[in-house]
Amino acid sequence: MTATTQSPSSRSSRTYPSLRAAWIPLAALCLAFFVEMVDNTLLSIALPTIGRDLGSGTTALQWVTGAYSLTFGGLLLTAGSMADRLGRRRVLLVGLAVFGLLSLCVVAVDSAGQLIALRAGLGIAAAAMAPITNSLVFRLFDDQALRMRAMTLMIVVGMSGFILGPLLGGTALAHVSWQWLLVINAPIALIAGIGVRLGVAADRPEDLTKDRLDLLGAALSVLTIGLACYSLTSGVENGWLSAITIASVVGAMAAGIAFVRHEHRSEAPMLDLKIFSSGTARGAAIAQIGTSIAMAGVMFGLILHFQYAYGWSPVRAGLANLPLIATMIVATPLSERLAKKFGHRIACLVGAACLAGALAGLAWGVAHGYAAIAVCMVVMTIGLRTVMTICAIALVEAMPENRTSIGTALNDTAQEVGTSVGTAVVGTMIAALVTTQLPAGVWSSGLVQSFFHGERITYAVLAVLVGLVAAGGAFTLTDSHSVDEAA
């Protein structure tokens, strides 16, 4: 990412000479970012347990994870706009407080509907945290190199949190009930809040904008994404030609068109659509959607695969994700070398090819044992690390210097939209091809074979979808060889 060049008058009054000197606020921001990202996937390992405990089918379980991603992704831009007006540290502290308090409410949940509503609320609180944690990193340092190292640390922490969710959840489920997976958020949010309060300087009025909030734009964006995702599940439950499914599709299209028209006409738009006239910004956002479709789709599908088709415990299923975690850490030098040698466009195309190839491999590998799946996971993670890092850099580089926070929010929004789509696609196809109700106990051999068949089709569809989306976005990137931001 390219740091914004700020005048002395606009800089925070509290900056640090090194990462070590800034360890309190940096650790707090990383902790806040980690908890909001890990919550995307923390419950995925517990979905079978939750399904049995609450009597939920695959559609309800899909929305247990999808509700969080839906509200999180839909409100990121709104949260970024609010932070620019009300104060970044203030909005982050409020988000942390609400996130922690809502997490405690899980002890009162006794139905799938209540859990989905709670997850939606947590997504709203997390939306007030994600783009702000990243933007506040820039305020900790005057030196550009330090800003870039800190941002790299944030990206790795966030991506690791997304992947570590199932492993942490599976380990916890061996000792406590699934509700504790959310309750633990409360003390984490408290610690992060204290660190932010102590180490991050308060916002100054001259650093904030007085533009009004684009509430209509925010509502239209959430409506567009929500109806689009609902239309997928409605097609399975009610039929693809049913009135409610058609109404959902038409409603999503109408809301999307209304959003575009409103943003073009608004004097203070939530998202200035003119930024998409830049091929770099447009392509980076599109490619990020592709990466998150792949990640969310694979993680949702493999959790069911390991626990149901293989009959593994939650802990063992969580440990099965270790290839993702290890590769996410060690793939950084490879991603940097690709970008240095070939430039953003070619490196991103290589990453997109890895994603599509890994998904195609899973379409074969799910019926051929864990070793085949693990190899595909490694290849997919190389693609994820490459595309996600390069596109995060390219997207913020394409932003005007005074709009880098919107660039960060747009990057996060693209990823969350992809997460919602990926989860919806896999959940919907498994429900349509295999079963809409997850049976208790050990699956019969016939149902396992049916599940394998459904997975093969699902991952083949994902391979085509992700390949087209990620490669299509990558083609519009520049030949920039910049990787200092990821060093």
Image: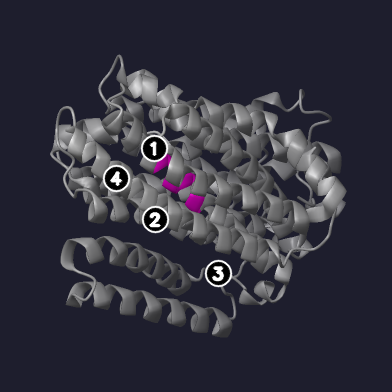
Question: Residue shown at 44%/46% (left/top)?
Answer: 363
Q: Secondary structure at mark 2?
A: helix
Q: Quadrant where the C terminus lies?
A: top right
Mark 3 or 1: the one toward you: 1
The picture quadrant where one finds residue 441 is top left
User: What is the CA distance from the residue labelled 2 to the residue labelled 3?
Assistant: 18 Å
Could you tell whether 309 is left or right of 272 in the image?
A: left
Q: Is residue 306 placed above or below 94 in the rendered structure?
A: above
**Of the numbered discs in the image, which one, if any, rests on residue 64?**
4
Badge 2: few (under 14), some or many (20 or more) residues near its Cα, within 10 Å?
Answer: many
The quarter of the displayed image where residue 48 is located: top left
Q: Are marks 3 and 4 in contact (CB under 8 Å)?
A: no
Residue type (three-letter) at the residue carrying disc 3 = Met
Q: CA distance from mark 3 to mark 4?
A: 28 Å
On screen, residue 381 versus residue 40, left or right, reads right
Q: Residue 339 vs residue 293: left or right?
A: right
The type of residue carrying mark 1 is Leu
Labels 4 and 1 touching (C-beta < 8 A) = no
Judging by the rendered image, the residue that carries numbered circle 2 is 70
Location of residue 317 (image quadrant): top left
At numbered mark 3, what does the secondary structure look like: helix, strand or loop? loop
SS at badge 1: helix
Let me know if residue 294 is in the magenta part: yes
Which segment did they paint magenta?
293-300
| Front position in the image: 479 or 144 | 479
Residue type at the position of mark 4? Val
Q: How many marks?
A: 4
